[in-house]
Amino acid sequence: MSATKTCLVVDDSDVIREIAMRIITDLGLETKGVSNASEAMEYCRGEAPAAVFLDWDLPSMGALDFLRGAANFEGACKPEIILCATENDEQQFTLARAAGANHHILKPFDKFAIASKLAELGLIDAEEHPELLSANG
């Protein structure tokens, strides 16, 4: 495993996954993308990403199934999980928080939304990203 932090993007939409991966790479982190929760579980068991951007609406094994499995990850292998949702549904966020996703962003997201969340989590330095500083101040 390299010293560079990795983010896993889990989304069944090739377009959404590619956009998120491109933004995260532009922010200086490594990325990996998978289209379903079972691939995400397999990846996380072997690679321990720093963060997982998890689509709420996944086919077959859903986001809650992934979150239940992620609860069993050991110590340093536990990634920060960011739920990516299309609706601002507080009940959905409450379920996700209870299952282990302490963060969320809404789709469609942009570079500012992803960078803000990664800075909040300490995975990137906001001072190295002028677009965040100018938007906040």
Image (cartoon, grey):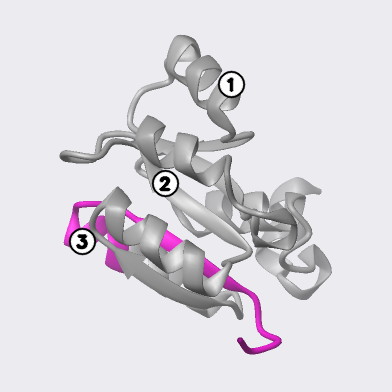
Residue type of the residue flagged with mark 2: Leu
Structural distance between the alpha carbons of marks 3 and 1: 29 Å
Instruction: Please say whether residue 86 is one of the residues in the magenta stretch.
Output: no
Name the N-terminal-most of marks 3 and 2: 3
Residue 120 image position (x, y, % from top left): 75, 49
Structural distance between the alpha carbons of marks 2 and 1: 15 Å
Query: Is 137 placed left or right of 123 in the picture?
Result: right
Residue type of the residue flagged with mark 1: Ala
Residue wearing tag 1: 98
Residue found at x 50% / y 26%: 96
The segment highlighted magenta reads: 1-18
The numbered mark at residue 15 is 3
The numbered mark at residue 84 is none
Determine crowd level at label 2: few under 14, some 14-19, many 20+ residues with C-alpha closer than 10 A.
many
Name the N-terminal-most of marks 2 and 1: 2
Question: Residue 113 or 97: which is nearer the viewer?
Answer: 97
Determine crowd level at label 1: few under 14, some 14-19, many 20+ residues with C-alpha closer than 10 A.
few
Residue found at x 51% / y 21%: 93
Residue found at x 19% / y 54%: 13
Residue wearing tag 2: 54
Judge whether 2 appears above or below 11 on screen: below
Residue type of the residue flagged with mark 3: Val
Residue 119 image position (x, y, % from top left): 73, 57
**Could one spot residue 1 in this view of the protein?**
yes
| Secondary structure of residue under mark 3 | helix
